[in-house]
Amino acid sequence: MNNQPSGLVLAGVSKRFGATRALIDGDLHLRPGEIHTLLGENGSGKSTLVKIMGGVHRPDSGTVTLDGVPVTSRSPRAAMDLGIATVFQEVLTAGSQSVLENVWLGSHGTFRRRLGRAAQRSIAQDVLTRIAGAIPLDLPAGQLSLSERQALCIARALVRKPKVLILDESTASLDVSSRDRLFVEMRRLAAEGTAILFISHRMDEVSEISDRVTVLRSGRSVSTMERSDLSINRLIADMTGSSGHAETRRQPHDAGDTILQGAAVRLAPASTPIDFELRAGEIVGLAGLEGHGQDQFIKRLAGVAGGPGSVVRLLPEGAAELTERNGDALGVAYLPRERRGESLFESMSIRENFALPTLGKDRRGGLLDTRSMARRFDAFARSLSLRFGAAHDAISTLSGGNQQKVLLARWLATDPKVLLLNDPTRGVDIGTKREIYAILHLLSAEGMSVVILSSEVDELVDLADRVLIFRDQSVFAQIPHFELSTESIVAAYFGQKSEVHT
Amino acid sequence: MNRVLTMFQRWPFAFAFLLALMLLVLNLIVSPSFLSPARLPGTLATLAPFVLVGFASTPSILAGGIDISVGPLATFINCLFVAILIPAGLGDWHLAAPIILAVAAGIGALNGILVAVVRLHPVVATTGMLFLLVGLSLTIAQNPVAAPDNWTEVFAGGIGIVPGALITIGVAGLTWFALRRTAFVSNLLATGESDVSAYGSGVNIKAIRILAYTLGGLFAGIAGIALTALVQSSQSSLASTYALLGLAAAVLGGTSLAGGRGGLLGALFGAVSIYLLQQLLTASGVAPSLIQFAYGAVLVVGVVLGATLLAPRLKRNPS
């Protein structure tokens, strides 16, 4: 290496927000032509580091250089002008603008358009096809699926032909086939000399794509590993600061009586009807490529979506049909997928977010007893090992993982017998994920039934008693516990019944 | 039915367009000479300030904000021209027009800076500006002052067979049309729709917001010229009339107050609808006190239709 290292170099970078030291000592060397993964729990400083590189934040101290030249970007625009393109964690699209406008958003000057219309169309079409398949360019972006919108954001970065490409959890919302195509594209770009920073919470992705991995912990870079030295146990040890990886895979066990039953549930007019029985103490996984019906199915089970067929809760005194309103009374709790839009009250406190649906329990003579609320909250905070400043802090001060725990506590407080979880660990760090898994194991041992929709294959393998794989709005395969493996699940995603036996 | 809905969703101004068409037919029934060549220039001259104030309201709304001060800005420009520029010997078009447009755009830019840089809420910033402009207008021209013969008369009459009002409306319209061919309007719509997305993608949203208010100011300046052409005097008292008409025209024309959706054509048809409704009610002998009531009713119905029934469904139709 010569004395002016090429690529993007961050040395001793720190950033503080009020009292929080988000980044204390961030070191990272992103070389041209490599795919470099940044790994760390939520709150480890990853996002702050990305936002410094992407021009959103400016570091309090430390240096950032690109090919030896100091970088002092004041905005994403300035970073892009230097050749650093960032795909941020949030899926950023302008919904009523066309796909084409969205792909080129920000590439233009304030007035000056980059390229002619025809060139814009053909490049956009080409880049989108390479990641997501054919997407009509004139469709409003708001009509796309989440996976397609994520692909759109990636395409927006790619059409700029950046020197440095930063992908912050860009695979979190991508369906598996688009993810695989993105990986092909990343390898091609790296071979052409692009430096790629990749962030993902999925260990399978990390071990598949990374040339090098840097681990961040509590705002500091703790280690950088070459591909040849990579081991998942060591990465987890570096991230959590502890060593040793507990065997989390669930042991087979007997389930109880049927407590929830779906009969002839049809997710689309022409699809095969689904019959489904959930037994006490079971953990059932739902999975599939995005948009194949698993999301609709869990909403049907929760009673929040309607349609042909019936979903009933079997109680000792008889069967009761589930509707949008009687979930609480029937002991069925549903945790929606989108924390921000569907679950959180962002300006309210942690405790209020927890207590809202169960305020009836804190009623004393018609008024609210805040001490009772605090007692209830403290009990859950302890059993879920929630990490927070004060219970009256806004929920937005928590990391994604801890927010999810508060929401889990919210629904556990309704004493459910059936817990329906829609992708509960999306965007949650691995430490918190494992805590949530432990809680679910414990609850199911106590007789609670859990249905968990997950976009993470490893999670299903570790957690579920059986997994239903959805294809084309119906159940394509049911994989029993003894056949559960990454291979069998992914094969079923793609319509192959695996013959693998362990 | 579905095809009709799709059309409304694709063209936000379709409702105002059909409303304007219907009102035009009704006007022609009540008063058959409504579109006669003799009346047309006068009709258009009365219409022009409505349309231009509607234009002036549109860019800031598209950018996700709002500018309540464009109507009073138009009347301020009217007072500035009649009560200051003409007496000071700056009344010739080659002196007055650049001054007027620069002052109007400058005041718009000031609104933009207050919103985008100082980060005041647009309602607060532009309401402040509204009172400031009303006060200034009253200070420089408390009572109506008649204007001597001047160049603005052309815009109330005509050049040959071309009604002068088409020039004021046309200049503003062409400016917008030219901007649509640049990246500005795309940037503007994206900023209004989702400023986070636009910023994260590298759009200079501060510049876009300031320019949106500046453009609104510029259009308000042209509205001031069209107003002067019509009234040929300083009319500081008209500020309150025009203050909300522009917003009403833009919103009736399908421009979404949430930002990111709409355009100048909507404001055009919205303003035409309001004007035609006023004409229709007057010609049918409805009491003037009821005319405002009718505006209100049309606006509420129009917005309810636009915002609920005809709003775009952001789901791809299952096919």
Image (cartoon, rainbow, N blue to C red):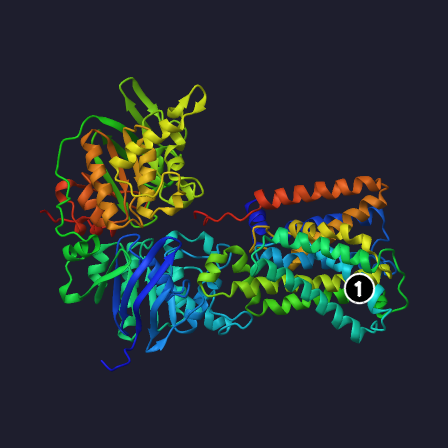
Residue beneath the point at 30% across and 31% down: A262
Residue under the point 86% across and 66% down: B153
Kind of residue sitting beneath label 1? Leu
Q: Residue at x 29, y 17 (%)?
A: A317
Report the quarter where the N terminus of chain A lies: bottom left
Q: Which residue is mark 1?
A: B80
Can residue B283 be seen in this snapshot? yes
Q: Residues within 10 Å of mark 1 (few under 14, many from 20)?
A: many
Identity of the residue furthest to the bottom in this view = A2
x, y percent for residue B130: 71, 54
Residue A486 as seen in the image, left or right of residue B235: left
SS state under label 1:
helix
Measured from the top left, where is residue A45 in percent x and y? 31, 57
Q: Chain of mark 1?
A: B
Along the line of sight, the residue nearer the viewer: A321 or A149: A149
Between A126 and A17, the one lying in front of the other is A17
Q: In the displayed structure, would residue A490 be above or below residue A71?
A: above
Is residue B48 visible to the viewer in this orientation of the structure?
Answer: no
